[in-house]
Image: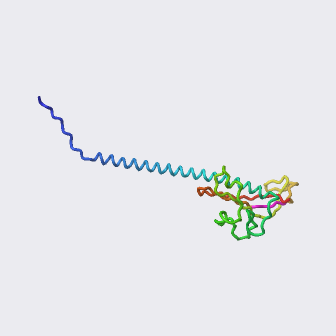
Amino acid sequence: MSRASLPVPARQRGITLVVVLLLLIVVTLLGLAAMRGTVMQERMSGNVAARAIAFQAAEAALREAESYAADPGRPAMPSTGCTNGLCATTAIGAAFPWESETFWTSGAGFRRSNLEGAANVDVDLLRYVIEDMGEAGTLVGTCTSDIDLSVSDCNSTAVGRFYRITVMSRMNNGTEVMLQSTFQAPVG
C-alpha cells in the first residue's frame, strides 16, 4: 500500500501575530479613551448636582435672611463692622468684610443659617450677612416701572430701609455658591 504524502505547509513568517497584536493595542487604547470620557462625564454630572444642591440651600438661607432683616424684633445694626450677621454700611472704597476668605470660617461677623447642620441638608457651611444700605424713598400706589410716572396717585413718600444680603453655601466636597440680593424692608 502506498501512502499518499500530504503537502507540507509553507513556513509561517510571523506577520499575522504582529498584526493581531497591533490591532489588540489599538482596540485597548480606544477602550481606555472611552472609559476616560465616561469617567469625566460622571464627574461633571456629579459636580452639576452638587452645585444645584448648594444653590438651593443658599436660596433657602437667602429667604431666611430676608425674613430676619424684616423682623422688627431683631437686634440693631452695629455702627461699625459686623456682628452676628449684621453689618454696618461699608465706607466707599473700602473692601467688604465678607470678601475675605477667612470671614466665612472664623470670627463672629456672619450668622449661621438654621439649615446649617440639618439632617436633610447636605451642606457643610451655610451662612449669611445683612448689610445696612440706608433708607430711601420708594414709589407706592399705582406707579409703574415705565418712564411716565405722571399717574396722580404715584408718590415717593413711603420710606424703606435697604439691605444687601450675602449668603455663602459650601458643600462637603468643596462646591461653593455665593448669592447676593438687595432687600427692602418697610420702616415702621
Residue 162 magenta-drawn?
A: yes
Residue 116 magenta-drawn?
A: no
Say how many tags the image has: 0
Query: Which residue appears at 50% of the width and 48% of the height?
Result: 38
Q: Main secondary structure of the magenta part?
A: strand
Q: Nearer the viewer, residue 165 or 81?
A: 81
User: Is 100 placed above or below 170 here?
Assistant: below
- Check the image and tell me how it is coloured: rainbow
Horizontal and vertical percent position of residue 134: 79, 64
Q: Nearer the viewer, residue 94 or 108?
A: 108
Query: Which residue appears at 83% of the width and 61% of the height?
Result: 137
Read off the magenta span. 159-163
Horizontal and vertical percent position of residue 5: 15, 34
Quarter holding the C terminus is bottom right
Horizontal and vertical percent position of residue 88: 76, 67
Quarter holding the N terminus is top left
Farthest residue in the right direction?
152
* Residue 78 in the figure: left or right of residue 23: right
* Residue 21 in the figure: left or right of residue 1: right
Horizontal and vertical percent position of residue 68: 77, 57
* Residue 9 in the figure: left or right of residue 21: left
Among the 4 quarters of the image, the one containing residue 130: bottom right
Farthest residue in the left direction?
1
Q: Nearer the viewer, residue 184 or 70?
A: 70
